[in-house]
Image (cartoon, helix red, strand yellow):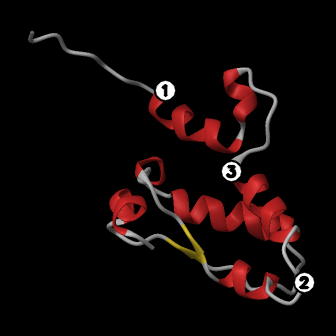
Amino acid sequence: DGQVITIGNERFRCPEAMFQPSFLGMESAGTHETTYNSIMKCDVDIRKDLYANTVLSGGSTMFPGIADRMQKEITSLAPPTMKIKIIAPPERKYSVWIGG
């Protein structure tokens, strides 16, 4: 219809809600906290592998810088000696449909 919509700093606040759901009025853990909690519920013998092989997938992971942010947030939660590696394949938008 030719309507122009100007988006300002809102474009940065949208992905922030993944890490701080309180922005949306939700009382839940952020993506990084949910990932950390999931790893911590696993057997201690596989945690190292999970921290070193966390794969992002799905369209909501396509925001620029999301892998770096996830790396930073998981690193702040994990034990200091743990190696953290966040894998963000370029085709991750479709990974949930085509398989890991």
**Residue picked out by circle 1:** 10
Kindly indicate the quadrant of the structure image that contains residue 76.
Answer: bottom right
**Residue picked out by circle 2:** 44
Circle 2 crowding by C-alpha within 10 Å: few under 14, some 14–19, many from 20: few
**Residue picked out by circle 3:** 31
Q: Which residue lies furthest to the left in this view?
A: 2
Q: How far apart are marks 2 and 1 (CA)?
A: 40 Å
Disc 1 secondary structure class:
helix
Q: Considering only order in the chain, which callout, 2 or 3, is on the residue closer to the N terminus? A: 3
| Residue at left offset 72%, top offset 78% | 51
Residue 60 location, x and y as percent? Answer: 47, 47
Relative side of 21 to 47, left or right: left
Q: Considering only order in the chain, which callout, 3 or 1, is on the residue closer to the N terminus? A: 1
Type of the residue with mark 1: Glu
Q: Do the residues labelled 2 and 1 touch (CB within 8 Å)?
A: no
Frontmost of labels 3 and 2 is 2
